[in-house]
Image (cartoon, helix red, strand yellow):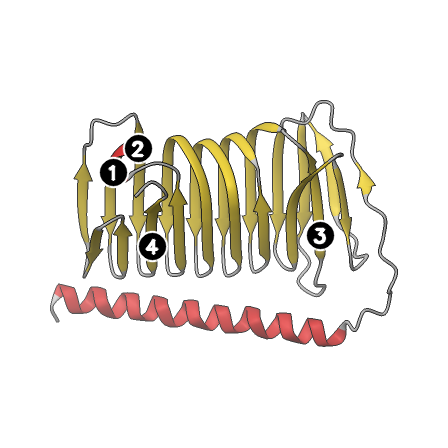
Amino acid sequence: MRTGTIIGFIFLILIIIALALGVFVLYTEVVDLRSQVENNPDTPAPEEIEDDNIVNLDLRLQRGNLRIEMGDKFSIRDSRNRPFNADVRNQTFYLDVQRWRHHSNIILTLPHSTDFENVKINIGGGILDLSALSADRMELSVGGGSITATDITARILRLECGAGKIDFDGNVTESLDIDHSVGQTIVTLDGQESDFNYDIDYAVGSVHIGDREYSGISGSDNIDNKADKNITIDSAVGSLEIHFKDE
């Protein structure tokens, strides 16, 4: 059997596994929503958090919804009144929602004009919606769920997409690292394509960068635009697109 055929067969198996995972996540979400006809109609009050020393965020959500928005105070609440684990240690705010049997709907409010040092957000089969977040270093990771991020600013940004979807819009001032597996990643950046240098590796699937397109079975490219910023791409099966606002 030819090497190309073997590689294609392996990635076909990966696609089938990813689709099965997506169907499972969707099924569990529907079953859970049907079981929760909001028995508790009372909306809980936000829990205020002392934010004087918080410079980092470490957030993990395996299931449910997480919305991050700007406001007057640092606070958190679950509109469905589900319990969650949150605390502050070593100048880092931690949120950990690992339950698969309960569909949380968490709203995290951050003070306006807050610039964080490190932000790490891991979404399993859940849904993340965030906007107007700024950090020196940021890592957004999704398994079978989805991430929608708008008006984001980071010096160093890392995006990891498994079988889910990432839709990112914002400004990267130094480097962007994309690890893309089976799902869909759409990135819209401030500036132009020529503002970045590129190191690209791809397998099966498609990679679009501005007017450039890469597809087929495995390949790589290195583009030196003599720019101050860099983009590194490792793409396996799915669809990856990078667009630029000034083009």
Q: Of label 3 and label 2, which has the lower sequence position?
A: 3
Q: Is 48 located above or below residue 2 in the figure?
A: above
Mark 2–mark 4 Cα distance, whole angstroms, equals 17 Å
Mark 3–mark 2 Cα distance, whole angstroms, equals 34 Å
- The residue located at (74%, 28%) in the rendering is 51
Mark 4–mark 1 Cα distance, whole angstroms, equals 14 Å
User: Mark 3 and 2 residues: CB-CB less than 8 Å, in contact?
Assistant: no
Q: Residue beneath label 1, please?
A: 198
Helix, strand or loop status at disc 3: strand
Helix, strand or loop status at disc 1: strand
Q: Residue beneath label 4, please?
A: 240
Of the residues shown, which amino acid type is indicated by label 3? Ile
Give me the disc on residue 106.
3
Disc 1 crowd rating (10 Å Cα; few below 14, some 14-19, many 20+) is many
Q: Residue beneath label 2, please?
A: 230
Disc 3 crowd rating (10 Å Cα; few below 14, some 14-19, many 20+) is many
User: Mark 1 and 2 residues: CB-CB less than 8 Å, in contact?
Assistant: yes
Q: Of label 1 and label 2, which has the lower sequence position?
A: 1
Of the residues shown, which amino acid type is indicated by label 4? Leu
Question: Which quadrant: the N terminus?
Answer: bottom left
Mark 3–mark 1 Cα distance, whole angstroms, equals 37 Å
Give me the disc on residue 55.
none
Residue 142 pos. (x, y %): 50, 53
Disc 4 crowd rating (10 Å Cα; few below 14, some 14-19, many 20+) is many
Viewer-nearest residue: 33 or 162: 33
- The residue located at (57%, 39%) in the rendering is 132
Residue 160 pos. (x, y %): 43, 48
Residue 131 pos. (x, y %): 57, 44
Residue farthest along the top direction in this orientation: 53
Q: Of label 4 and label 1, which has the lower sequence position?
A: 1
Residue 39 pos. (x, y %): 85, 70
